[in-house]
Image (tube, rainbow, N blue to C red):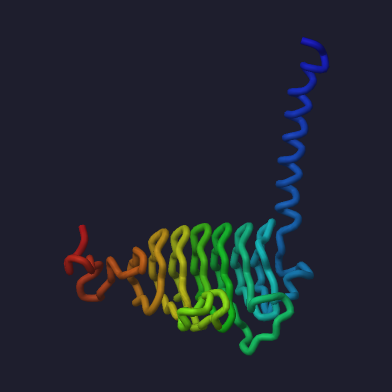
Amino acid sequence: MSWSQRLRPAVRRASAEALRRGWEWASFAAAVGPWDPRARRFAAFGEGSLLAFPPGTIYNERYIEVGSGTMIGPYVSLAAGMAPGQELLNSPVVRIGDRCVIGRGSHVVGHWSIDIGDDVQTGPYVYVTDQNHAYEDLDQPIGRQWPVEAPVSIGAGSWLGAHVVVLPGAQIGRHVVVAAGAVVRGHVPDRSVVAGVPARAVRRWYPDRGWVDVDRGRTPR
């Protein structure tokens, strides 16, 4: 084996290590904290909060509030309205509370009102929106019909598993677990576990009975 052939693996290893270290440095240095100029674009960006690098699509930050001690993972998209520069009627359109964790690759897309309470955590690739396509006119393409909006709220202390979809009008209570892959619409009571498409309660907590399996009406083992 010639010296050039022996050199190639060493060069590759050195280059790969340099790239990894560079990416680690970029992820640290490019993360947005409350001290950064980009954080000042937001309606609020609390002390100790972090927007990880690389971000997803983020625009109209002046309509978005982020509380204190909240971590927004990499590739997360945060948007208010349909396009950058759009003037909106409400402020904030999107509010994320204190000590939240928004998982990698998630999307929070607000047009009217999305309110995420304190201490809410999500798994990766969760989608939350307060606007959806309408289907009133059977002869018009759905994409051309005026969308419908309804406010969304996610109660404090809740956990949303990976790939959860929260639809317009969803009102998720406090301390709720939403199972991975569930599609949530309508009202979800406090201290419950919901699963499925569409999501429905599978367990609920009652002060006098504890946890009750909703399907069977009995306390689970």
Quadrant in the rendering for residue 185: bottom left
Q: Is residue 117 visible?
A: yes
The quarter holding residue 200 reads bottom left
Residue 162 higher or lower than 18, as above or below: below
Q: Is residue 62 left or right of residue 133?
A: right
Task: Residue at 58%, 58% (x, y): give it.
Answer: 105
What is the residue that sits farthest to the bottom in this orientation?
89
Q: Position of residue 84 (x, y in %)?
A: 72, 75
Determine whether, in the image, residue 98 is placed left or right of residue 58. left
Q: Which residue of the protein is positioned furthest toward the front in this rendering?
A: 139
Image spot of residue 110 (x, y percent)? 58, 77
**Which residue lies at the image location 50% right of the left edge and 75% below the top edge?**
117
- 150 left or right of 53 in image: left
**Position of the C terminus by quadrant:** bottom left
- The residue nearer to you, when weighing 27 against 137, is 137
Q: Is residue 95 visible?
A: no
